[in-house]
Image (tube, rainbow, N blue to C red):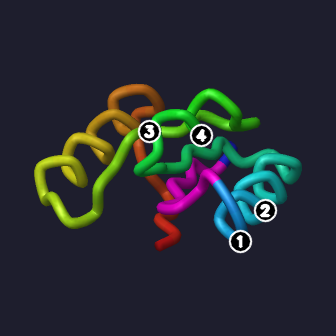
Amino acid sequence: MSKVVLITGGSSGIGKAVGEFLQSKGCIVYGTSRNPQRIKDSKFPLIALDVTKIETIAACINEVVSKEGRLDVLIN
């Protein structure tokens, strides 16, 4: 069974590289981004998220769990 991973800041830099690596190893990867434009340019699904707003954090986690049934790993 593949691990379901959520990476905050997954649209660029280290977060993006880690997401692409984990995806290449068979993980189901979701990332987050504050920038909606970057959501279109990703190799794995990105969810809009502002970590300063608690309601967007809960919505993000709920979105992953509703699609995959679980969340195994959170990388912040």
Q: Where does label 3 land, which residue?
A: 47
Q: Which residues are magenta?
A: 3-11
Q: Is residue 38 above or below residue 72?
A: above
Would you say the residues marked 2 and 1 are in contact, meaning their CB atoms lie under 8 Å apart? yes
Looking at the image, residue 25 lies above or below residue 62: below
Residue at the spot 63% in from the left edge and 46% down from the top edge: 29
- The residue located at (29%, 55%) in the rendering is 50
Going by the numbered disc 3, the residue's amino acid type is Ile
User: Which callout, 1 or 4, points at the residue further toward the start of the chain?
Assistant: 1
Local crowd size for mark 4, using a 10 Å CA cut-off: few (<14), some (14–19), many (≥20)? some
Q: In this figure, which residue is indicated by the disc labeled 4?
A: 38
Name which of mark 3 and mark 4 comes first in the sequence.
Answer: 4
From mark 3 to mark 1, how far is it between C-alphas? 17 Å
Q: Dividing the picture into quarters, in which one does residue 51 lie?
A: bottom left
Number of the label disc, if any, that sits on residue 14: 1
Comparing labels 1 and 4, the label whose residue is closer to the camera: 4
Picture quadrant of residue 28: top right
Residue 7 picture location, percent across and down: 54, 59
* SS state under label 4: helix
Q: CA distance from mark 3 to mark 4?
A: 10 Å
Marks 3, 4: nearer the viewer: 4
Residue 63 part of the magenta segment: no
- Of the residues under marks 3 and 1, which one precedes in the sequence? 1
* Numbered disc 3: secondary structure: strand
Q: Residue at x 12, y 49 (%)?
A: 55
Other residues around mark 3 within 10 Å, as few (<14) / some (14–19) / many (≥20) = many
Are dots 2 and 3 in contact, CB under 8 Å?
A: no
